[in-house]
Image (cartoon, rainbow, N blue to C red):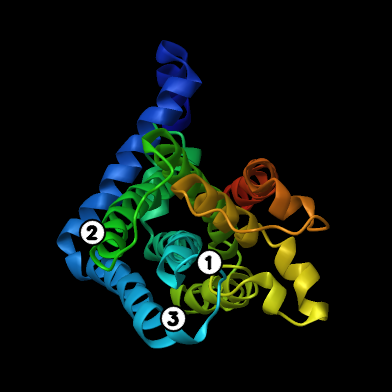
Amino acid sequence: MNSRSITEEYANKHGKIYWLLHDSSVIAWRNLLRFRRNPEVLFFDVVQPIIFILLFAYVFGGAIDVGDSSYRSFLIPGIFVQTIAFAGASAAIGLNADMNSGIIDRFKSLPMNTTGVLLGQNFAELARSVITLFIMSLTGLAIGWEINGGFLNAIFAYLLLLAFGFSMSWIGASIGLSVSSPQVASTAGFAWLFPLTFLSNAFVPTETLPTWLRFFAEWNPITSIVAAARYLFGYPMEVAADAPLSLQHPIITTIIWLVVITAVFMPIAARKFRKATSR
């Protein structure tokens, strides 16, 4: 009996969805155990956004005018979104490292759903994001940021942030499966994220940008989720009557972006993974 027939036997016993979720949770736990053995990875995941918070709040905050709100109230949701977006690059690096280490070949010999490797990788990144968001929230509260939108709105904001991280992980997985090494995955994973996050309302209002950049910034998915997070945390920004729908209805726009990104890049990542593991 080969691994394929064993896999089919297990799938028929409990159902494919059950085993997909089971195998995904096993892979996610395996990836989280790697963080326990290498805590410096998680340490620097947390330290970098804290440095961004302190740098922008204390060094640049006095020079940036955001209207009636304090810059720290304006800044923290933007840092949240930037950090969550960077989870996509982490997914690219981690998946590519697994592809090059030979561990995927071992998984193929087991009675498991190999698609669970992709889901497990992204679930592990989701768990990292929960820890990172918790630490960043404590940092924000320590420097004067407050949650003024109510408990349920705050929970919804955090769920939107995590859903955004999950969708970005599929982009990262697609990149990680398209390049040859973890070093290239690191460069490719971050190269597009920096302009995406800085050409948005994460750090400055979009009204301050040149006209030729403003259109891109206003329809940037980062802008939508940052605006949604600010609103839900109790710091909505004034929006002009002629502002685009992405700023007038940021929560709805964010949900649309999440669905579109996941619907596009999840199949791409799955197809690339099947192609890579069938060699």
Element at label 1: loop
> Residue at 41% across / 42% down in the picture?
154
**In the rendered image, which quarter contains the N terminus?**
top left
Foreground of the two, 42 or 176: 42
Instruction: Please report whichever mark, 3 or 2, sits nearer to the chain's N-terminal start.
Output: 2
Percent position (x, y) of residue 225? 58, 53
| Residue 109 in sight in this render | yes
Residue shown at 49% from the left, 87% from the top: 63
- Mark 3 and mark 2: span between their CA atoms? 34 Å
Q: Position of residue 219 (x, y in %)?
A: 74, 60
Q: Which mark is residue 61?
A: 3
Residue hosting label 1: 68
Q: Which residue is mark 2?
A: 35
Mark 3 or 2: the one toward you: 3
Residue at 49 percent of width and 21 percent of height = 16
The residue at 71%/69% (across/down) is 217
Which is in the foreground here, disc 2 or disc 1? 1
